[in-house]
Image (tube, grey):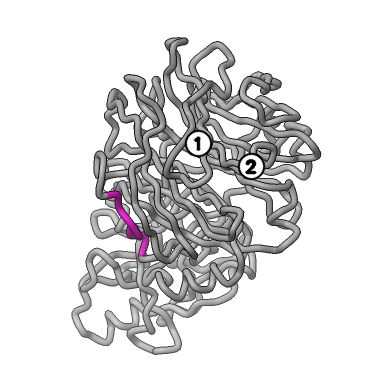
């Protein structure tokens, strides 16, 4: 669940992600074996809803993004919802995508539009999907009759029972949140609820990784920490806590675990700011912080789920929903910061922020030379980034030759990393776009620090 009995503060930033951080727990994901994604080389899908600091990018529908490496995520449908619930509260949180035994999918989500944590819905949203391009047979599925909520549903195939298990956070007779379970064969009718896991204190956001060298791991949020339990079976009541918990700088929630190319990545949600860690061996419980340079979450994504998908599903989703018509640019040496305009000045600021549209750009053919590039604002499309007294400003195109030259740049291999990008001024070819005191400008570049300042990723 994207909130809890003690919701996260509305804004926070974590630092020091480039250092190794030992963790004694992980988040969890997926159905099936430890090596399912890595063995097949499958691409991935992420399901999420959206939230931004002032609510300008908040949307309680199902959003989808795809990735070939589970690190760099491309939003589909211009980062708009692909489906929105029509029943219950009319909104969703905490979507979960389940690949079923027959190759189709079920999508489930919390029935909650907004942040009224006192809302007591006994239902979850459910859709069937053949290929994550259509979402059919929408229904509200009642899981219990208790006077309490039904948060963060997830599901897995329990082969020993020949049924799917739906786990979720709810308050039972214990008086605190526990992980409940119902069993089903069709996601239309369910067995009576029972307690799946109760460590004796308040927990939410239960999530499973199954069959990892014969062990099943259950990870959950306790207050603002992630804690892990494990069991060699999937029977209710069989899991025991084996970690002390992780609470980095104020709290994290919504754990996800994904494996790509033999590496496990743990994602955590800190109020719509995702962090990732990695390990080569899930059983150790020790993780290293992943450099933010190598991963980019979908814009405004919140409490997500990640699943491997077949290549044909990936291709068909991209064909249907389309790639974004805009880009975002991330700083190489401050990878928590993105290009944006503020008061018509170009700068780099920490993600997330509002208006989030200040960070969206159309890279169009250069106004002075089509082999170059110009940066057109998405939310102020008559304006382009141009240099004036060497500082980048967002100005209206006045149609002059001078403006066209000032607003044109040549994209080159990144000065600090050739897999990234740098941008050389058209009319001052000895100068590159770089940040200085977080403000974008054009300068001659001659030092390692300057090359890092002048290097950016172009993604979504």
Q: Position of residue 171 (x, y in %)?
A: 42, 19
Identify the image quadrant of the C terminus.
bottom left
Q: Is residue 409 left or right of residue 219?
A: left
User: Which residue is found at the position 68% from the left and 19% from the top?
Assistant: 240
Identify the main secondary structure in magenta: loop
Secondary element type, mark 2? loop
User: Which residue is found at the position 76% from the left and 53% from the top?
Assistant: 262
Q: Nearer the viewer, residue 247 or 360?
A: 247
Q: Position of residue 256 (x, y in %)?
A: 57, 41
The reply to whether the magenta stretch includes residue 123 is no
Residue 31 showing in the rendered view: yes
Circle 2 packing at 10 Å, graded few (<14), some (14-19), many (20+), is few
Q: Is residue 207 above or below residue 74?
A: above
Q: Nearer the viewer, residue 32 or 408?
A: 32
Label 1–label 2 contact, CB within 8 A = no
Q: Is residue 60 left or right of residue 352?
A: left
Query: Which of the 4 quarters of the picture holds residue 10?
Result: top left
Q: Alpha carbon of mark 1 to alpha carbon of mark 2: how far?
A: 28 Å
Circle 1 packing at 10 Å, graded few (<14), some (14-19), many (20+), is many
Dot label at residue 182: none
Task: Point out the stretch of residues depicted in magenta.
Answer: 78-85
User: Which residue is found at the position 42% from the left and 64% from the top?
Assistant: 76
Q: Position of residue 49 (x, y in %)?
A: 38, 48
Q: Is residue 373 above or below residue 160?
A: below
Q: Label 1, on which residue?
A: 254
The reply to whether the magenta stretch includes residue 79 is yes
Secondary element type, mark 1? strand
Q: Label 2, on which residue?
A: 162
Mark 1 / mark 2, whichever is N-terminal: 2
């Amino acid at each position: 669940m994207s909130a809890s009995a003690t919701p996260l503060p509305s804004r926070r930033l974590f630092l020091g992600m480039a250092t190794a951080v030992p963790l004694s727990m992980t988040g969890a994901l997926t159905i099936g074996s430890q090596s399912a994604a890595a063995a097949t080389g499958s691409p991935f899908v992420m399901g999420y809803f959206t939230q931004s600091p002032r609510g300008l990018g908040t949307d309680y529908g199902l959003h989808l993004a795809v990735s070939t490496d589970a690190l760099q995520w491309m939003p589909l449908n211009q980062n708009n919802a692909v489906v929105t619930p029509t029943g219950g509260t009319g909104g969703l949180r905490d979507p979960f995508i389940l690949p079923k035994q027959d190759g189709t999918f079920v999508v489930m989500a919390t029935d909650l539009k907004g942040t009224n944590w006192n809302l007591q819905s006994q239902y979850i949203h459910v859709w069937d999907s053949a290929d994550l391009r259509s979402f059919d047979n929408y229904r509200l599925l009642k899981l219990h009759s208790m006077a309490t909520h039904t948060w963060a549903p997830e599901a897995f195939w329990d082969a020993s029972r020949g049924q799917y298990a739906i786990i979720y956070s709810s308050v039972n007779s214990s008086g605190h949140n526990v992980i409940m379970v119902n069993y089903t064969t069709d996601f239309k009718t369910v067995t009576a609820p029972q307690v799946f896991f109760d460590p004796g204190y308040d927990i939410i956001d239960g999530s499973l990784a199954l069959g990892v060298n014969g062990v099943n791991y259950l990870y959950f949020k306790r207050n603002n920490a992630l804690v892990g339990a494990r069991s060699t079976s999937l029977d209710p009541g069989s899991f025991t806590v084996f970690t002390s918990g992780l609470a980095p700088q104020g709290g994290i929630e919504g754990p996800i675990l994904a494996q790509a190319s033999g590496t496990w990545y743990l994602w955590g949600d800190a109020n719509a700011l995702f962090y990732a860690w990695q390990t080569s061996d899930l059983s150790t419980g020790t993780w290293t912080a992943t450099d933010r340079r190598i991963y980019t979450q979908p814009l405004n994504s919140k409490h997500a789920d990640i699943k491997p998908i077949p290549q044909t599903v990936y291709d068909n989703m991209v064909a249907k929903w389309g790639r974004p018509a805009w880009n975002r640019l991330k700083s190489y040496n401050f990878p928590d910061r993105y290009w944006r305009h503020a008061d018509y000045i170009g700068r780099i600021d920490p993600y997330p922020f509002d208006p989030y549209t200040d960070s969206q750009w159309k890279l169009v053919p250069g106004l002075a030379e089509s082999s170059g590039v110009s940066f057109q604002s998405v939310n102020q499309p008559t304006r382009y980034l141009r240099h004036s007294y060497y500082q980048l400003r967002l100005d209206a195109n006045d149609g002059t030759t001078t403006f066209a030259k000032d607003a044109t740049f040549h994209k080159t291999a990144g000065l600090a990393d050739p897999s990234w990008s740098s941008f050389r001024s058209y009319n001052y070819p000895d100068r590159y776009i770089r940040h200085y005191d977080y403000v974008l400008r054009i300068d001659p570049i001659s030092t390692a620090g300057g090359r890092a300042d002048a290097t950016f990723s172009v993604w979504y």
